[in-house]
Amino acid sequence: MLTWPEIARSPQLAKFLDYIVRRKLEGQEQAIKAYAIAVDVLGRPADFDPQADPIVRVQARRLRALLDQYYLTDGAAETLRIRLPVGRYVPELVEREESLPPLREPEPLSAMPALPAVNVAKGDSFGVSWFALMMLVAGVLVLSLALVAFWPRDSVEATGDALDRPSLTVVEFQTLGGLQGFVAPSGGLAIELVTDLELFDELIVRYGGGGDAATMGDAATDYVLTGIVRPDGDMVQFSAILTDVNSGLVVWNQSIAETAQAATQPGVLDDVSRQLSLRLGSARGPLHRKAQALLDEAQLPDGPVTDYLCTMMFHRYRDTAAQAAAELVQTCLAKLHLQGEPSAAMLAIEASLIVDRLGTGNGDRFASPVSISRAEVLLNKALQTDPTSAFVWEQLARTRLAAGATERARAAFSSSLQLNPANADALAAYGLQLALSGEVGDAAAMAQDALDSTADPPDWYFGAPALEALRQGKPELAAIYAESYSRADRELGPILAIMAGQRAADPAIVNRYVAQVLEVPAFRVAGVLPRLRERISDPALIEQARIALLAAGVPQASLVNGF
């Protein structure tokens, strides 16, 4: 496998793969950590901070994609396969399963931070005995199992054969005794989460109180979210656990760390809720596992369809930009039209498809005035139907961008994020617009929030991070981000990769992407720089791109005129 050209051309990825597999075979799984990979494989210094530098996570994502590609092509006949689960760095050696596609596994419960040994000396404000700690954890697990055992299970098939929105019940988090005196008790976290997650049209969210039968009532649910708040040295860990009611399995867990001082502030619950909502509300998140499995089949199921199914198909299309995915969404919308009047979200999706299919789907040119006009009619109707839908405002912002109305697009993005601050897609798209306007620093936080929302973010999320890495003088990281982004944006992606490759002194990257730049239809019609000025309003970035392209060998005439 190390000699396969797609892996061999990247010495770092080959070394990454060799490192983790050999450690696995040697029985040293505990040594396969982000820090060890960064220092031993990627050449990072001894003071490397995995939380501040995402290089290991990004390279693992690239390697995971290459493994999937290898077993679909040259390695299709391999019976023993190497799998790198999402969210982990320890590889798995598995027998090929003929009937199943490559799996996207949830983060295991073991990925949660280990419970610390807590000082029980008098005067320690976080003091608690190991017995009490274990009893609390056991209580949370018993509560989860009780909810799974006795909760009705009919909501998944509530609409017959049609796949409908998953339902989630959020139960109050349990707090360790040493934290009871905090200004921001965890008792309000469940309410915050319900409030934030209700902003996602793709979810049904309920408040489960303390988890007792009287509070929960008769409502059916697909998932239950429980959790604990515990001390961890000078930090406080907010740990969430998501259980699938139908299978009884823990399918996801996440810990958010806050300093002890921050945990005393009233706004901490809002911050923790937003971070958890970014992950749980994502269309690529654990609550949509059933829809994701159905979408992997790449065909529309027989029988009725739902708004939810069409929306999830639209998200898959946005992530892949594949023609077949767009046609699947259109077919789904057509079936919905036969079933009744379309909702605001469906009108917004139809508008987005009109713009994408007729103009900007491949990043070749702005959409035509006719397509923009048709899309605006649909979007105005959508806003009249549901003026508080963050999803609709996001599609309006993208349509305005396609029309070249950047300031109006900014206003629409701002409205979308005011309505739902945990909308990762809007964060990624708005962050890119800010970065192309020269506001890279302001865009960085948005882009990072979007990347953190999923273990396997789509390629189009990496535009603003690539620009931020260039600004910070991290060309190797910028090259990784730009190579991902180039798969989603045929215009800007290759140019960012060339800029990063030159700064990283990597001629292979430069040579590979120069050819791609010269094949972009919009560049050939108008010239490279005139087209870039339609999309980039930062003069400094335009100049950097000009210098980089000239140094890469692009003729001056091609920069300013069609060719």
Image (cartoon, rainbow, N blue to C red):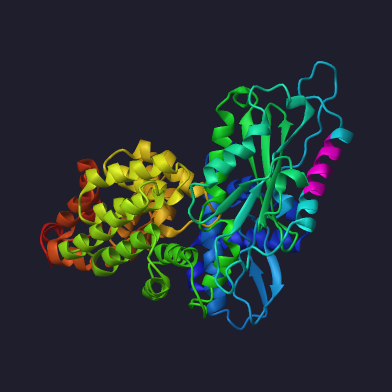
Residue 506 or 106: which is nearer the viewer? 106
Q: Quadrant of the C terminus?
A: bottom left
User: Horizontal and vertical percent for residue 361?
Assistant: 30, 66
- Seen in the image, is 145 located left or right of residue 325? right
In the image, what residue occupies the spot 37% across and 36% down?
A: 441
User: Horizontal and vertical percent for residue 321?
Assistant: 38, 67
User: Horizontal and vertical percent for residue 131?
Assistant: 89, 35
> Which of the 4 image quarters holds residue 513?
bottom left
- Seen in the image, is 44 located left or right of residue 317? right
Residue sticking out furthest to the right: 131
Residue 337 or 4: which is nearer the viewer? 337
Q: Quadrant of the N terminus?
A: bottom right
The magenta stretch spans residue 437: no
Question: Relative to residue 159, is residue 75 depicted above or below?
Answer: below
What's drawn in magenta, residue-wise?
133-143
Residue sticking out furthest to the top: 123
